[in-house]
Image (spheres, rainbow, N blue to C red):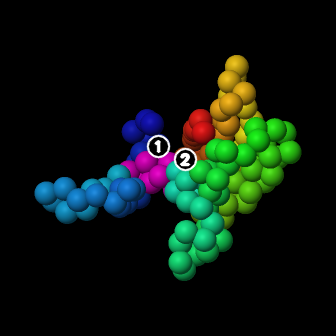
């Protein structure tokens, strides 16, 4: 990220995820890392896992032992898109959010999740890949 892009963001420290303590108190991260942590929280939190937000999360763990087939990919893509759109509201441009789910290249036993979005305040595209 260039200095010009960084200067457009407020200098706010966000609590690191997962939460951890250092000698100076809770560890903090930048806004870019905070947004990535939000993506990871949605991906790896199962619906019903959070008491006060039972609808939150995608539940990647439950997809690990499901058949790796096109109907599952489409269902997973729609579910993940909805969860991410809600969790990242205000941080990313909702029109730029893209979610792809399918088999890993040359690895049919691997479920590959690719997430792309544009940070609204910077107009900077971010891309993340996760293999399950």
**Along the line of sight, the residue nearer the viewer: 40 or 87:** 40
> Furthest-right residue in view?
71
- Give the residue at x 23% y 59%: 21
Quadrant for the N terminus, please.
Answer: top left
> Furthest-left residue in view?
23
Q: Is residue 17 left or right of residue 78?
A: left
- Give the residue at x 55% y 53%: 44
Q: Which residue is mark 1?
A: 5
Secondary structure of residue under mark 2: loop
- Give the residue at x 55% y 59%: 45
Q: Are marks 2 and 1 in contact (CB under 8 Å)?
A: yes
Pointer 2 local density, CA inside 10 Å: few below 14, some 14–19, many at least 20: some
Residue 17 in percent (x, y) is at 39, 56
Q: Which residue is mark 2?
A: 122
Quadrant for the C terminus, please.
Answer: top right
Up-down relation of residue 25 to residue 54 (above or below): above
- Of labels 2 and 1, earlier in sequence is 1
Residue 61 in percent (x, y) is at 59, 51
Please provide the residue range marked out in magenta.
30-38
Residue 18 in percent (x, y) is at 38, 56
Q: Is residue 118 left or right of residue 96?
A: left
């Amino acid at each position: 990220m260039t200095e010009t892009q960084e200067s457009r963001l407020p200098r706010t420290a966000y609590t690191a995820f997962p939460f951890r303590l250092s000698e100076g108190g809770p560890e903090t991260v930048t806004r870019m890392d905070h947004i990535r942590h939000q993506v990871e929280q949605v991906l790896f939190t199962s619906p019903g896992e959070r008491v006060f937000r039972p609808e939150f999360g995608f539940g990647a763990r439950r997809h690990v032992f499901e058949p790796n087939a096109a109907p599952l990919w489409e269902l997973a893509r729609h579910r993940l898109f909805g969860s991410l759109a809600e969790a990242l509201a205000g941080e990313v441009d909702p029109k730029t959010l893209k979610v792809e789910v399918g088999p890993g290249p040359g690895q049919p036993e691997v479920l590959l999740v690719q997430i792309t979005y544009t940070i609204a305040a910077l107009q900077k595209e971010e891309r993340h890949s996760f293999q399950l």
